[in-house]
Image: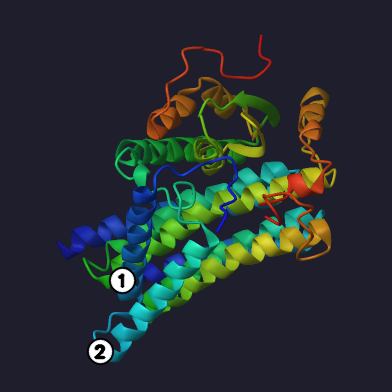
Amino acid sequence: MMFTVAAVGVVVTMAMALARALIGPSVYSRILAVNVFGTLAVMLIAIYGFIDDRPEFLDLSIVYALINFIGTIAVTKYVTYADMGHGDDGDPAGDI
Amino acid sequence: MPRMRLGCFSGVEGDYVTRTLGLAAALAAFWVLLSGYWLPLIIALGIASIALCVVIARRLDVCDREGYPIHLTVPGITYFPWLVKEIVVSNITVAKAILTGDVNPQVLQVRASQSDALGRTVYANSITLTPGTVSISVDEDVITVHALMDETADGLRSGEMNARVCNLMGDSVPTDTKHEVGAA
Amino acid sequence: MEAALDVLSWIFIVTGLAFCLIGGYGLLKMRDMFARLHAASLIDTLGVGFVFIGLMFQVGFTLVLAKLVIVLLLIFFTGPTATFALARAAINHNSLPAVDDADKKLAAETKSTDRSQGGIG
């Protein structure tokens, strides 16, 4: 019961984030909304593990949290440079 | 092998060894946590992958005081609870602001008085982690912040978080009461 | 004991969900992307935090508890970095926050012209 309530609440919030991702208007708002959607998906996976009494789902949420972060950085970088990497121009900081 | 660093030098070599061992220990703990099996084959595979990760980390030269700040563990005991308290308080403030629609977005600049890049990173990340204030640019020691409302902006202007991060990093706390850049 | 833990779980999960829903509402309601960042950080910090603490009361001292802590810390430490990268990218592309003119100028000044230095990481 408790976990079902939690899952429903998270799904409703996910719908809100998805609505913002569809409305936009700027690409950055969409990225932000997708980032939030990913965070909520991590929560939903964890909660589903509790509903189904299979704690292994937490491993999935760890991986999803990592992918969500790297994905956000990658997409941000892609819309900024239209390229996944660029030369370091001799700068020691390089392609960070 | 010449070491290229980004403005922050990691003291002595012994320090470096401690950090490498600390990294190995943390990776081992993480492996045991994820696996939960104690079969010889699995353990051997775990040791092999930990060794590989540590070798790669040393080759990448990320195992220094910036990349693996193990020395912040003890000072962090007082800092992180304070940060969590601050996060809870400003969460409630921002939640109220969202519900009432009473917002006044503004941009301000504050001076980070930490002595190195790691300290300023901790400060800028703490600002972002606290809802109501987001750091949008870090230039040398000036951090540009987007604040959602006057209340959260004033909390940042008081400079308490700056002083606490200075304490955390072991830097001297600024005596100057004016924390905002360019404020009258 | 069991009942007390259940009550604690309920309190934390419901509070966390309240923060999530308010954050989602703010995400829809706020007018510009920088204001939406604040609403998103509501979900990223206490929304996730309280729900996970609520879940923690249900598992006792097991490996699952440690995994919950790991996920929570992961979200806590990666969130600000992603937010900062997003804010940098927006400013570098002239998507400035909707604030007073003087403040807008301040934000625009932080735009990095040299892309090898500006970066987004």
Judge by depth and name the residue closer to the eye, B160 or A13.
B160
- Which quarter of the figure is the N terminus of chain A placed in? bottom left
- Density class for disc 2 (Cα within 10 Å; few <14, some 14-19, many ≥20) is few
Dividing the picture into quarters, in which one does residue B88 lie?
top left
Horizontal arrangement in the rendering, residue B178 relative to residue B170 (left or right) = right
Using the image, determine if residue B181 lies above or below residue A3.
above
Instruction: Give the structural element (helix, strand or loop) at label 1.
Output: helix
Residue on which disc 2 sits: B40
- Which quarter of the figure is the C terminus of chain A placed in? bottom right
| Rendered residue at 46%/51% (across/down) | B64
**Most distant residue in the front direction:** B1
Using the image, determine if residue B170 lies above or below residue C25.
above
For badge 2, the amino acid type reads: Pro
Residue C43 percent location from the top left of the image: 53, 53
Using the image, determine if residue A8 lies above or below residue A89.
below
| Rendered residue at 57%/54% (across/down) | B2
- What's the image's color scheme? rainbow
Pointer 1 chain: C
Residue on which disc 1 sits: C64
Q: Is residue C18 visible?
A: no
Using the image, determine if residue B174 lies above or below residue A16.
above
Residue C89 percent location from the top left of the image: 76, 50
